[in-house]
Image (tube, helix red, strand yellow):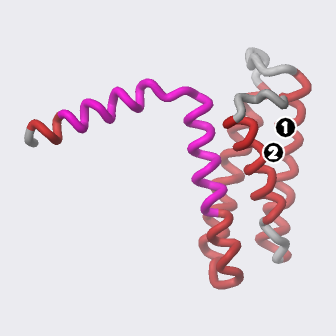
Amino acid sequence: MNAIQMAQNAYRQDAQATRTHRGVEYDAIARITHALKTASERGTTGFRDMAAAIHDNRRLWTLLAADVADAGNPLPQALRARIVYLAEFTRLHSSKVLTQGASAAPLIEVNTAILRGLRDGGASA
């Protein structure tokens, strides 16, 4: 490894260490939302990619719901309840997308709204 590679690796590690929880959440939701949009645009030819994106989205929302269910979570109770509701909606609608051919648009809209909230600092929450 040369000096440039060592410097790049050192910078990359410091940059990752300074990321906020909000930034990590934003990146994960943005990545999954992009995958949902891309698969949705492909229609039936993108079913495999849609199934993978749905799986990732379900895992994400399960983690978010588990996080807000923790008694030590600092978010306001009303916001925590809305996140649990959205996690349940996501679970149910994901099944409809996969088994009944429903549109993924509502899932994309929910994620996009969450991204806006994270980007704006949760001012509207």
- The residue lying at 78 percent from left, 46 percent from top is 113
State the count of labels. 2
**Residue 71 spot, x, y in % from top left:** 79, 17
- Secondary element type, mark 2: helix
Q: Are marks 1 and 2 in contact (CB under 8 Å)?
A: yes
Magenta-colored stretch includes residue 21: yes
The residue indicated by pointer 2 is 87
Q: Amino acid at mark 2?
A: Ala
* 22, 56: nearer the viewer: 22
Q: Is residue 79 magenta?
A: no
Could you give the CA–CA distance between mark 1 and mark 2, rounded to whole angstroms? 5 Å
Query: In the figure, is residue 73 to the left or right of 81?
Result: left
Front residue of 121/62: it is 121
**Residue that label 1 marks:** 84
| Side (left or right) of 13 relative to 2 | right
* Residue at (70, 72) in percent of width and height: 40
Picture layout, residue 124 above or below residue 97:
above
Quadrant location, the C terminus: top right
Quadrant of the rendered image containing residue 102: bottom right
| Residue visible at 54% across and 26% down in the picture | 20
Q: Position of residue 4 (x, y in %)?
A: 14, 40
Main SS category, magenta section: helix
- Looking at the rendered structure, the kind of residue marked 1 is Val
Read off the magenta span. Answer: 7-35
